[in-house]
Image (cartoon, rainbow, N blue to C red):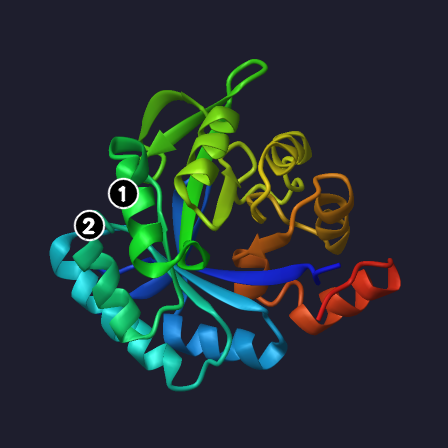
Amino acid sequence: MLAKRIIACLDCDLAVKGGRVVKGIKFKRIRYAGLPWELAERYYKEGADEIIFLDITASYERRKTMAEIVKKACQKVFVPITVGGGIKKIEDAKKLFRAGADKISINTAAIKNPKLVQELSKTFGSQAVVVAIDAENRDGWFECSIYGGRKFTGVNAICWAKRVAKLGAGEILLTSMDRDGTRQGFNLELTKKISESVSIPVIASGGAGKKKHFLEVFKKGKADAALAASLFHFGEIKIPALKNYLRRKGINVS
């Protein structure tokens, strides 16, 4: 059985002094948390299995800033790095891979142009392509959003997950917008439904507040990895303590 992964997520606002890590609640009410390359190094030393950088204010100009952030992080971080935000074509991805990224994550561009998932997978390999799904509960079904949660699409998240898996995505980064930043626990219903619908790994995101929430999403949600941001940023849960807790509960972690 593959080990479950603990992933630290760094949401980067590149409009602020060359890039700062931020965290909000339900994609709003933003607060600043630190410098992305410094936080990435800290999480690497603490035992994070992967680091995800998300450019929440993506634009053509700021993509250069993200590449510089990745370069800085790669000097001292030696776990897989995923980068997302504003990737619209093969060349955008190439720049980030050249900077040192191991994987790229796409959301808006994938929904607007599903063939991009296939093109990226064929060019870089499916293991390097993560499709992010930001979904909100709609009375019994889950709707995908784009543009950082600012626009809803009418696309069913479970159907979309199945489609991107067939198109060649190697992994799904699943965020429950209803739970994002709330500390109420991951959305187990959504995570389980998508985990059972696809054969590729699913990263659970949105809602972590306690160690037991990670246990629940691995056992009940059937996630392959679990992601947190503010819990780690502000020192409320330390990664070594979280992994020790999970081991005691019978979860296979590195």
- Which residue shows up at 34% across the image and 24% down it? 152
Q: Pick whichever of labels 2 and 1 is earlier in the sequence.
A: 2
Residue 39 makes an appearance in the image: yes
- Identify the secondary structure beneath mark 2: loop
Q: Which residue is mark 1?
A: 116
Tell me the quarter of the image containing the C terminus.
Answer: bottom right
Q: Nearer the viewer, residue 118 or 210?
A: 118
Q: Is residue 131 above or below residue 250?
A: above
- Is residue 12 or residue 160 the one in the foreground? 160
Residue 117 image-quadrant placement: top left
- Residue name at image x 46 percent, y 73 percent: 39
Q: Position of residue 174 (x, y in %)?
A: 51, 42
Task: Give the residue type at disc 1.
Answer: Leu
**In the current view of this chain or complex, which residue is farthest to the front?**
122
Give the residue at mark 2: 89
Please provide percent x and percent y for residue 188: 68, 35
Q: Is residue 17 visible?
A: no
Mark 1 element type: helix
- Separation of residues labelled 2 and 1 (CA atoms): 7 Å
Q: Position of residue 196 (x, y in %)?
A: 66, 34
The quadrant in which the N terminus is found is bottom right
